[in-house]
Image (cartoon, rainbow, N blue to C red):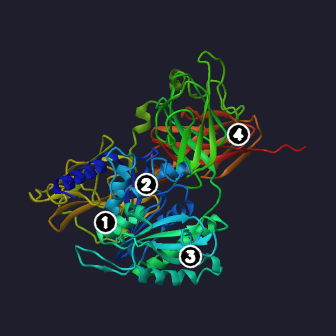
Amino acid sequence: MSWPRLFFRLGLITLFFLLFINSAWAEGDRQHIVYFEGTARELEVYKIFGRQNGPTIMLIGGIQGDEPGGFLSADLYVDLALKRGNLIIVPRANFKSIILHDRGPDGDMNRKFDEVNFSDPDFERVEIIKNLIAESDLMLNLHDGSGFFRPKWENDLFNPDRYGQCIIADADVFTHPKTGKVIKLAEMANKVIAKLNAEIPEPQYKFHFNNHDTLSPNTRYKEQRKSASFYTLTKLGIPAYGVETSKQLPSLEMKIFQHNLAINAFMELFGVIPEQPRIILDPPTLDFMIISVNQRPPVALADRQTITVSPGDTIEVLRVDANYGRGLSIDVLGLGGINDLKTKLTIHKPTSIIARRDNIEFGKVNVEIIDPQREGPLVASSHSHILEAKSGYLPGQSLTTFAQGLKSEKEHTNLVGTIIGVGPASLGLPSVTGNGITGFVVEVDGHKLTIAPDEKLIIKKGCKIKLVAVESQIKLPDSYVLNLKGFVGKPFGKSGDDMGTTADTAKDMLIRFAVAKTPGKQTYQLGAEDGPKLLAAAYVEIVTPRLKSVTLEANGKQSILTVGQRLTLKPGTEFIVKDIVLEDSLPLTSPHLTLGGRPFPPKLPAKLIMPSIAVSLAIFTDGELAGKVVLAPIKRNF
């Protein structure tokens, strides 16, 4: 490749990274990056880092979408913890092909690693995957192949032209022409095969090494010169293999298990020490689709429920809550593409929203069109008597009625956090004298607060905290800085100086710098520093909002329910939502309340009617679900 072309390609790759990465997070030992989120081209990348340094193995699944054993096996390794070494996992390299259960709707992606046209729909993802491969010491491309590979012909299903139950390489031994590195592909593969065959009792399902001899001019597999493994070996000098289980194995679980055996054997060979993932094949089930109409507060709808909208309304499915967290897509039938998650679509006629995990449909929400002049309550068709008429905002209805029940914005946001005293010893830190410093001035979502040394400010994840000033009774040295550890406010300024900058607590904090962390809570040090000397410190605890309790009153009796608890009532009973309390005394800002997926005004006390089916009373704050309690009808005796 010429230098101008190389620089052009590198520039394009940088541009793609900056423009098309939608979200990324890093948490201690792992990193998750999502490209092209909410589209059919969505590409999720997971990097898992061991506690000890070691080689990096890359797993690619789903490059051909009709081979589920490979991508479901790779998906299991996302939740792995590593003692030594690292993993880079791309469980669904071609999400569109997986959704469609098609080998390659835009052509075979595994034949695009030699050269791919800039206009090709797969171009950006192929370039991203190439960069990830370059970070690895071994690449495994996971597939399900036809039949059973055998070095010699046995019958139509067991012969050299089949791909199942083998490990494929492009040579027995390869010497990289630029580095002189000698890669003994056959030797390593046979060690792995011996180990995994010891775990496979059935002789017909045992693995064999398959040398495609791709570099030879007489190879029968010239098309493999365009594959990811050939690119990895010949261009980068990194050992690479195709791992193929057979499509004719009797169960999907067996395919996944044998992929796991092969991956684990390669990890052991390379000294990457894992924990064995378990195989989860529970049927996917839909809890809720979180849907916004005309960018208004979202509604949570369960499987088979119906949302009603007016002609011309815009809907957006913000999230799918299911018993699986990955491989999910939604399809608004007749509109958009095959993955319409987080896509705004205008509705003119009735339709359905289908939820899928990979290529399996597992849930549906119906969309009905209503007459804007229609009178009376508009409720989901599967719910009767959930809400009284005009008791809450319903899609297609004017916001005027809904707004009458709302508290003012000021009433919701006059409390932004809680300040408590905390000694450094409770966090396992040495005590620091005040050195004349009396307080740290910050702004949380525009509200100014002062935190004294050794105090802790508790705020919700998602708040924006601006670091304003340090209050002191004495003149501080000119070299001092205000430093919120875990936040990089001025990457090119004075080291550790965050004065005047604003941290978005939902995405800007690096969790590995937290001085204390528990699920849903991380505490960071806010310090005045002079070089290596800490002059004084306070602390900021960032908390994911969680529901503590809901107080309900029915039939003259008051009940306090905690998250997940259930209250039984007779259908048609009027009950009152009297109070809602979040953990850590956090404020319930921008609240959104739903009963059975239908919203009602967040003005307490709120009167509602018990429906004839079990429903959840869900509490959202700032667009995130804080928790829910369950209301169940008392069964009638017949």
Amino acid type at circle 4 is Ala
* Distance of label 1 from label 4 (alpha carbons): 63 Å
Which residue occupies 39% across, 38% down?
414
Check residue 150 in the rendering and tell me which mark sits there, or answer none: 3
Percent across and percent down for residue 596 are 64, 39
Image quadrant containing the N terminus: bottom left
* Distance of label 2 from label 4 (alpha carbons): 60 Å
Q: Is residue 515 visible?
A: no
Q: Is residue 520 visible?
A: yes
Label 1 CA crowd tier, 10 Å (few <14, some 14–19, many 20+): some
Amino acid type at circle 2 is Met
Which is more foreground, mark 2 or mark 1?
2
* Distance of label 2 from label 1 (alpha carbons): 18 Å
Which is more foreground, mark 3 or mark 2?
3
Label 2 CA crowd tier, 10 Å (few <14, some 14–19, many 20+): many
Check residue 134 in the rendering and tell me which mark sits there, or answer none: 1
- Counting residues from the start of the chain, the first of labels 3 and 2 encountered is 2
- Counting residues from the start of the chain, the first of labels 2 and 4 encountered is 2
Foreground of the two, 298 or 570:
298
* Distance of label 3 from label 1 (alpha carbons): 32 Å
Secondary structure type for disc 4: strand
